[in-house]
Image (spheres, rainbow, N blue to C red):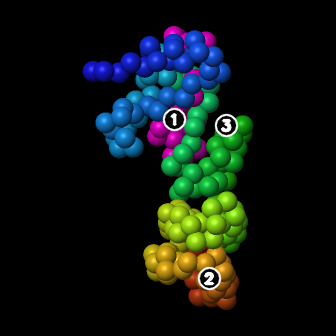
Amino acid sequence: ESIKIFDVAKMVEQVGAKAITIHCRTRSQGHKGDPDWNWIPRVKEMVNIPVILNGGVLGPEDAERAFNETDCDAVMIARGAIANPWIFAQTKQLLLTGKYDDEVSIYQRIDLMVEHLRLSCESKGERRGVLEFRKYYSGYLKGFYNSAKLRSELMSFLTIKDVVEHLEAFRSIIQQNYDQFDQNKQQVLNP
């Protein structure tokens, strides 16, 4: 009952903003419930700057649907990248070709996770970087063999060295036992 999106969008444009991002949920919704993308075309009618849709873009198909249904100028991807860091490349591929490669191996996930962790530690310091990185383990390892146990073990480490060594040991087990996992190859290597 107190949504002032049109007035705010006009004010933002009048003070010189080059674009506006609209999180398509109310403050009381937070990150819960479905976003209301119907605001995007209505705001686009009110302003002459690009309107960026935010909220509910959890996969490449969501981004494609957002463009098709709302005529937004861009989409913002946030939480969708936590569970799938490849969402940006996959979305670009889908929008350009009409399809995308969704198979990301555990080896690719571990490599990117280690790189991400290193960057986190470089920017925040090792202890803080490792501790704050814990929230990403589930996204990187989701759906893989024994991932709950691995995540639990990773949560106990306080140094990047320990995390990387443990991940490399996990990678080694997967490589050594590939034939043993034959029936679960798709689950192990491609969730």
- What whole-number distance in Å separates the C-alpha atoms at marks 1 and 3? 17 Å
Sequence order check, earlier mark of 1 and 2? 1
Q: Which residue is mark 2?
A: 162
Is residue 49 rendered magenta in the image? yes
Which portion, as a residue range, is magenta?
Answer: 44-69
175 left or right of 79? Answer: right
Q: Which residue is mark 1?
A: 54
- What whole-number distance in Å separates the C-alpha atoms at marks 3 and 2? 40 Å
Q: Quadrant of residue 98?
A: top right
Q: Quadrant of residue 129?
A: bottom right
Q: Residue 182, how many percent across, how many down? A: 59, 81
Q: Residue 172, how many percent across, how many down? A: 67, 85
Q: Residue at x 59, y 15 (%)?
A: 15
Q: Which mark is residue 83?
A: none
Sequence order check, earlier mark of 1 and 3? 1
Q: Which element type, helix, strand or loop, lies under badge 3? A: helix
Sequence order check, earlier mark of 3 and 2? 3
Identified by mark 2, the residue type is Asp
Q: Residue 53, how many percent across, how many down? A: 53, 31
Give the number of the mark in front: 1 or 2: 2
Q: Which residue is mark 3?
A: 95
